[in-house]
Image: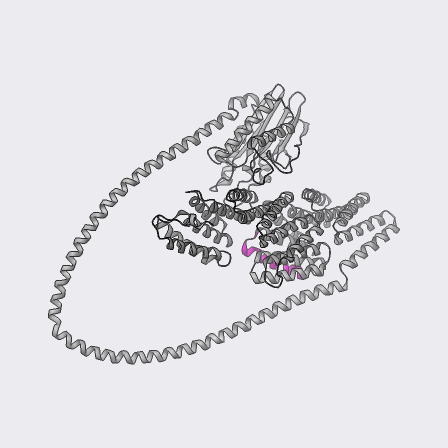
Amino acid sequence: MAIGMLLTGKGYPQSKINQIYQQLAAADELTVTDQDSAFNIACQKIGELKKNKSLPDTLLGYAYYIAGEAKRYGAGYEDAKLFHDSALRCYTKPMYPLGLGRVWHGKGNVYLLMGDLDSALFYYKKAIYVRTQANNLLDLSKSIVNAGIAFFKKSEYDSALFYYTESLRIRTQINDSVGIITSLTNIGNIYLYQNNYTDAEAYYSKAKSMIDTTSASRQLASILNNIGNIYFRQGRYPLALENFMQAIRWYDVFGDKASKARIYNNAALIHFETGNIGQAMEYHNRALELSLNINDRFGIADSYYYIGRIYHINNQFDEAKKNFAYSLNQKQALGDVSGSADVMQNLGVVYLDGYVFDSASYYFNKALTLYRDVENKFGQATCLNNMAELYLKNHQPQKALNHASQSLEIAKSYQGLSEMSVSYNLLSRVKEQLGDYRAALQLTKEEMKINDSILNKETASTILELESKYQLERKEQAIQLQQLQLAQRDLEFKNQEIEMAWQKRIRNLSLILVLLLSVLIFWLIRSLVYRKALNNRLDKQRHDILIKNEELAQLNEELQTQQHQIIIQNEVLVKQNLKIEEVNATFHESVRYAEYIQQAVLPPKQRLNAIIPDHFVLYLPKDIVGGDFYWVHQIKNKLFVAVGDCTGHGVPGGFLSMLGLAFLKEIVTMQQVYQSNIILGKLRNQIIDSLQQTNDLLEYVDGIDMSLLIIDKESQTLDYAGARGKILLASDGNVELLKGDRTSVGFNPRMKSFTNEVRPLIPDQVFYLFTDGFVDQYNEQDEKYGMQRFTDLCKCNHSKPMPVQKEHFFQTFTQWKGSFEQIDDATVLAFKL
């Protein structure tokens, strides 16, 4: 930190400024371990700094930042955002890059903990930008790795790996050993979730080799947990449980409740797989209690999922469904794709056990699609086995054979012994049903070999021994703590007795001395009072009168001086207010003019009515100028309709939207390109050229999410392409969602060509093009509106007249938002041919 730049006040002693900074730095250290003390110190300094205008604003910004961090660590996320916003205002007058980077990184952490991953990424990228400009490599690596964590939680593993690798490069460059260990562990986590256990264990082992395993370390605990996960998925349960127990002991030292809850769930899974259901339920309940205590939404969702599995194994199907439904709702809200697939698969198993085959097949297929989207081999293998079981029960042996064979091949690719055992069991039963008993016997032998390697008497004994050692160690620690507390109480009691005896002696001696002195003083005073009483009284009265007169004269003079200063200060304030009003008026005039330009670029109402008479447009920018745009154009028998969402909002988003509109018109009207995916490709090229984006981490932040629809009225077909955009088609009470490609119109290091979909038109079909501002809006209960609610809204209203629909959509958005701040621009364009 450049202290000279940060700590410079106008006419204020530098030593006092440095003292305040040191006090704030000490409070900053306390935010992790003692949030109440850190918050109280920060609030005290905020009060002092606001009173003294000669101190630098950057000090006040630092105090606001510390208060926000204390609230974040204490799970007071809304308060944390307010304090961070106050800090930002201090760091922008004048601009202070180090402070801005710190606060934007902190806001990203708040949204990450809240599960709002898109907002977290938005602020991390702002922090990355400003820290790159300031060449602050240590803090830059922290923002990059946290952005990777956000992508990891979104199950976008390629992007997460890119950010983790970049953070490792920077940390290696500056020789940050602690950061290198974290980056190696994060990369290992990617490979773990992709079931590449060889590479995952290699990265974990490399990170572990850099840690002193004899001393307490959060990083060592995290690595032990991850290695335990590898052993668990490979069916090596004793080694997995041993690593989990070691990790729990370290997290006990640090009081890390979130991490401890995750490991409790992991240990419970081992007991679940080995048939110790009671012990598994006990660990899951411990994990849930810890997660609820700290409001860890990811941990809460995981615990309800695992508890649902216990209810399922105990044939309590209704309770299992309730727990799965709650977990699925939370995981979908948090954007946890793999976790959502896990819950869907288990819901399918519940319906399978209840012989409700249609519902079971529905959930299995949805889960398998998600597993394939995120390349989760473990999930694919288990889901294919469950689908094979479904077909076997439904007397479709050939389909069962195909699915079990696919599962076996996938499980072999990552040495998943448990899944291989299930696959061999299914294949044996299929062969038996088909009458091939020799093949069935051979497959049963293969299953038994694997089961012997997973769980034999020695393995079960080892697991019970490890569990007993852990429970015995906890009891011994509790006994030692009780003995220490009793000894401390005895010592405090003895010290109190000694202190009380000593105080009693001092009190008795003091009373005797006071009594003797009082008698002596009484006689001395009595003799003096009688001699001088009258003279002293008169002299005192005369002296008091003179002093009072002088004080009154001085006070009158001070009041006149203060009155003159107040008059001067009022004149200065009046001039400053006039200047501020003038600047505000100029600023608002500029923004309004930008709004006027944007409205002029968007299609006018008369043109929309002429091209698509039966339509409505709901355009709700977050600020005066918005980053959303829509475009409608007709060339002969072809109708072009597009809706775009540019990065950011306000004036920056507005400029990017006008740029996108101009390029879109040029490609269609001048270049005469009439195929949707080719239009998006050319638009991306022109955006990259215009913004001069290159293969740089920071230069592909800007881009456009877009849905593009081309309707050929002559051939009665529609041609659709999307760049992270979607379109809803509604007709006869049914709603269908068309998804585009999962990449924006802008630079990306893994760019692919856009794809399109051509299909015939359906009479009286209603088309809904929209940006994500409506779907992502939160209400006063911190709930996201979500895609399902939006789909239902379109389904219920598509048969109504367009003006009625527009009013209903607007009222729905307004009532849902309530007093909550609008988080993004929102646009809906609907029409019927």
Q: Which residues are magenta?
A: 279-296
User: Residue 246: x, y in percent?
Assistant: 64, 62
Camera sees residue 455: yes
Look at the picture and state if 428 lies above or below 513.
Answer: above
Inspect the magenta stretch and tell me whether residue 607 lies in it. no
Q: Main secondary structure of the magenta part?
A: helix
Residue at (51% x, 54% y) in the render: 73
Which picture quadrant has residue 633? top right
Question: Quick check: 351 above or below 659?
Answer: below
User: From what the image shows, is residue 602 above or below residue 813?
Assistant: above
Q: Position of residue 578 (x, y in %)?
A: 32, 36
- The magenta stretch spans residue 280: yes
Color scheme of the displayed model? one colour
Residue 209 rendering spot, x and y as whole percentages: 65, 58
Report the front residue among 530 and 142.
142
Nearer to us in this view, 551 or 54? 54
Q: Residue at x 73, y 58 (%)?
A: 236
